[in-house]
Image: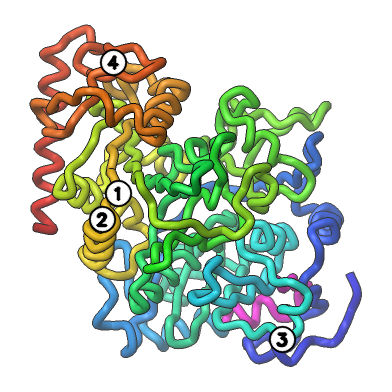
Amino acid sequence: MSSPPISPKLSRHGISAAARVAAHLPAAALVEQALTRAEGILADSGALVAYTGSRTGRSPQDRYIVREPSVEADIDWGKVNRPLEPARFEQLLERTCSHLGGRDLFVQDCSTCADPRHRLNLRVIAEKAWHALFAQCLFRRPTADELATFESEWTVLAAPDLRFDPKTDGTRSEVVIAISFEQRTIVIAGTHYAGEIKKSVFSVLNALLPRGGVFPMHCAANAGPGREVALFFGLSGTGKTTLSADPSRRLIGDDEHGWSDEGVFNFEGGCYAKTIRLSPQGEPQIWGAIRFGTVLENVPLDPATRRADFDSEEITENTRAAYPIEFIANAEPSGRGGHPGNIFFLACDAFGVLPPIARLTTAQAMEQFLCGYTAKVAGTEADVTEPQATFSTCFAAPFLPLRPVRYAELLRERLQKHHATVWLVNTGWTGGPVGVGRRMSLPNTRALLRAALEGSLSRVSFQRDPIFGVEVPSECPGVPSEVLRPRQTWTDPSAYDTAAKKLAEMFRKEYEKYK
């Protein structure tokens, strides 16, 4: 690593004594640095493998938003958006900058939003080379000409080796993820989990874009041969990345998008795919994307062959791959598409009572969107070791700074204007709850989605589910008819009725919060 003088642009972030600064290194150089600095090892595929220690998922209880006058009235304060006083943030920021000073730093200038009208320029300053590579994979990469005139609007300080002291720093733990909208700065300290970088920026966009009439969405998006767009909403582990990676359709993005008056656009320049039980048969596109330039997070390797063991939960179920979206062969290079014709709400149903697919009315779509039912999948958050039923409003509660009804209003406006069909898809269990039933068959789910996208489901009859009130198709090519009705998959129908009514009552109580 060379030793150039510190850039004045870096010192304006409060870091004035860094040992060496490497800016905008190519992926190969970042991999070299990560290996030299013992930050990771190479897999036989050429991917860089990094391990994050005790934090193998997000730390939501350590996430804060600075309580500043310009945003105080807009933020939905509470357990998700924990307030942090400006003076306290200044202290944490000063400690972070002091920690980064004197260390080798890696700077990655990048941006968000494929639609240039809504673009946000970022500067990621990281003490780990692999975190800089992660940012390079996940965000949009400026061209050389763009870098020549690049001006960052937001700064991300990634200091995983810094540990805060709750007694002296006033924090809950040694970890801090803090967002200041007035200083346009994100501090991430005490955790090596790279997903915090991605999701903190997503939270910023969720606060800023609605001001310009853009609906920010926690969803994947792809487009068919006729350019028709489909959206896939869902929390981590529900199948957004897997189901949107369809060889017959062009991938717009796997996780975060905006819906403007012009259509849908990707926030990111890469993908962050769960890899637990990844196989070339089940997810060939993701499998093919794991190569040199990809970051594998917490994936065990065979010590002799360096082959990744994607079936292993030895470290966490939340194993990940971060890679540029162009590593997917049929990715849409523009990152943009038109207005969606189909919207899928993916729910990982831990009770095993929801049908594998159901058509929703606009009113039902609003209810499901505000409830955001799914199950927390083991490993996606600290202290979550097994699936747990949960409601996450707008399928994105951990990342929503504004009140949920603000996002719901944006969805309603677009459904009314563009008449998209909304589907509820169960990617969780059938035949019984977790521990009794079995996980939904991925080939069956793909067949159901294909039928919806191609229009064949619109030509079959539908029956109203007596408990949930949704419309369930009577048949689907390639899918056994009994699978479509979960009650028939249970050995004890009365037990199904009890569980289904319990979940329906949970829906009702949750929706009461927003009515």
367 part of magenta stretch? no
* Residue at which label 2 appears: 415
SS of the residue under disc 2: helix
User: Which quadrant of the structure image shows residue 66?
Assistant: bottom left
Residue 36 rendering spot, x and y as whole percentages: 86, 56
The residue mark sitting in front, 4 or 1, is: 1
Q: Where the N terminus falls, by quadrant? A: bottom right
Residue 14 can be seen in this image? yes
SS type, badge 3: loop
Mark earlier in primary sequence (3, 4)? 3
Which comes before the other along the chain, label 3 or label 1?
A: 3
Q: Nearer the viewer, mark 3 or mark 1?
A: 1
Q: What amino acid type is highlighted by mark number 4?
A: Gly
Left or right relative to 150: residue 20: right
- Give the mark, 4 or 2, whose residue is nearer the N terminus: 2
Can you tell which mark lies on residue 149? 3
Q: Real-space Cα distance between discs 3 and 4?
A: 58 Å
- Front-lying residue, 172 or 316: 316
**Disc 3 to disc 2, C-alpha distance:** 39 Å
Classify 170 as above or below 509. below
Quarter of the image where the C terminus is located:
bottom left
Above-or-below relation of 393 to 427: below
Q: Tell me which amino acid carries mark 1.
A: Ala
The residue identified by callout 1 is: 420
Q: Residue at x 27, y 27 (%)?
A: 459
Crowding at dot 4, Cα within 10 Å, few <14 / some 14-19 / many 20+, comes out as many
